[in-house]
Amino acid sequence: CTEAKFLSTLTLLTALLLCALGAPVETEVTDILAGDSSGEEEDVVTHGLLSASPFWGLILGATARHQKEFEEEFKSEMTYYYLDNYRFPAIPAGCPTSNFSKEACLKRLAEGLNTYMVLLMYVEQEYPNNAIVMEIKPYNIRLINLIKEKNPRLVTNMTSSQQEKLLSDLNNPIPFERKMTAHCILRQFHNFLRDGIVAVRKRERGRTSRDLPHDKCFTFYHS
């Protein structure tokens, strides 16, 4: 399958890019994008599968650079894991590993992707022209459209009033708190996509992928 070969190449390029940036990459990077590496994987037809789309890798490759940005900004003031303290209700829930049908999982994924489109607007307010945000927004839209192509009923866009309320609820008069919220959004979006591709692949291919860490602030980098 041409798309599958492209995804495999993309996975390698993503890993090489991260290494070039000086960030050690854990094996989960290639495992998540390439799937279970047991010999049976070659027999799975990936054409047309949402989990085989290259946009997952393009987004994850960009968001994986977030830790480096965070540490360069705050240097020794705090560790990346300080973001564990920043969680808020607006963060979308992911697709459960079980007891969820494929349709229900895709609906949850679409809702989350749409919510993150708004949350990324908040990040842009705090960090105008942020390279990661500018890079991932078009791919996020493409993922949403792929779900819509499979079933338009699964995708419902937020109204302008809902978007305004979501953003206003995040307002904080303290600059430091606003920055932490923006960084938490990027970190949680990375985790949402990381868990999302595993959940979708499991339902599309009917096979259980290798279990991955489920803590919200898991990172592709070594501490």
Image: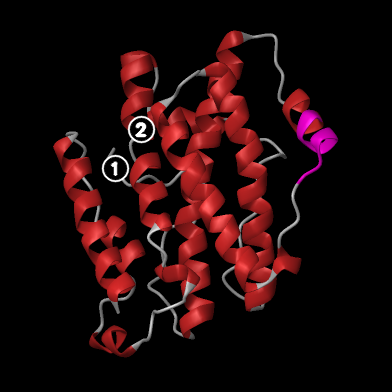
Q: Is residue 135 above or below residue 68?
A: below
Q: Secondary structure at mark 2?
A: helix
Residue nearest the observer in this picture, 185 or 99: 185
Q: Is residue 58 above or below residue 33?
A: above
- Which region shows up in magenta? 158-164
Whether residue 161 is in magenta: the answer is yes
Q: Residue at x 41, y 75 (%)?
A: 209
Write down the residue under mark 2: 67
Q: Which mark is residue 172?
A: none
Task: Write down the quadrant of residue 145 in the picture.
Answer: bottom right
Q: Residue at x 79, y 29 (%)?
A: 164
Residues at circles 2 and 1 in contact by the CB criterion of under 8 Å? yes
Q: CA distance from mark 2 to mark 1?
A: 8 Å
Q: Left or right? Give the position of 172 relative to 128.
A: right
Whether residue 51 is in magenta: the answer is no
> Residue 134, percent across and down?
45, 32
